[in-house]
Each structure stands twice: as structure tokens, then as C-alpha cells.
Image (cartoon, helix red, strand yellow):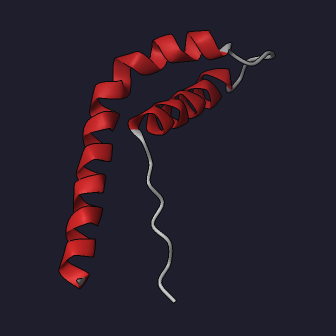
């Protein structure tokens, strides 16, 4: 039985990045950082993360094509 491939949209990847950024920003603070503030901070680093995600998707596609 072959493992199922999860398809991630860029929207899901973006919100995952915001979640991680929010956790990083909230460390050492009494209250959690708001989602909106985390989105603003995440937008600065998103271009680098987006490139990594795109490379990973291409790599996985090549791997699947090679197996067929």
C-alpha cells in the first residue's frame, strides 16, 4: 500500500509560516502575539520560505515521476 501524498496549497503553507512566526514572537512574553501582528512579521521572511516550499514541491514531483 502506497502512502498518500498530501497536497499543500501555498495558502496553507503561508498560514503554517504565520503560526511558526507567532510562536517565535510569543516566546518570553506574558501574552500571545496577535495573529495579525504575526502576519505582518511573517511577510518579511515569507519570500525565502516560499522559495524553499516551491523547491520542495518540485523535488517531490520529480521523485514521484521517477518512481513511475
Counting from the top left corner in percent of width and height, residue 34 is at 68, 13
Q: Is residue 22 left or right of residue 8?
A: right
Counting from the top left corner in percent of width and height, residue 58 is at 22, 56
Counting from the top left corner in percent of width and height, residue 1 is at 52, 89
Q: Quadrant of the C terminus?
A: bottom left
Query: At 47% from the left edge and 15% from the top edge, which residue is drawn?
Result: 41
Query: At 50% from the left edge and 78% from the top edge, which residue is drawn?
Result: 3
Q: Is residue 38 left or right of residue 52?
A: right
Furthest residue toward bottom: 1
When the figure is inspected, residue 4 is found, relative to residue 68, above or below; the finding is above
User: How many circles with numbers are drawn on the protein?
Assistant: 0
Q: Is residue 57 left or right of residue 30?
A: left
Displayed quadrant of residue 45: top left
When the figure is inspected, residue 16 is found, relative to residue 58, above or below; the finding is above
Query: At 50% from the left edge and 72% from the top edge, which residue is drawn?
Result: 4
Counting from the top left corner in percent of width and height, residue 43 is at 40, 17
Amino acid at each position: 500500500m502506497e502512502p498518500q501524498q498530501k497536497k499543500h496549497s501555498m495558502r496553507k503553507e503561508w498560514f503554517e509560516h504565520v503560526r511558526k512566526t507567532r510562536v517565535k514572537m510569543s516566546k518570553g512574553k506574558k501574552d500571545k502575539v496577535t495573529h495579525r501582528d504575526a502576519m505582518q512579521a511573517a511577510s518579511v521572511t515569507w519570500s525565502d520560505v516560499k522559495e524553499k516550499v516551491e523547491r520542495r514541491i518540485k523535488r517531490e514531483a520529480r521523485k514521484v515521476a521517477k518512481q513511475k
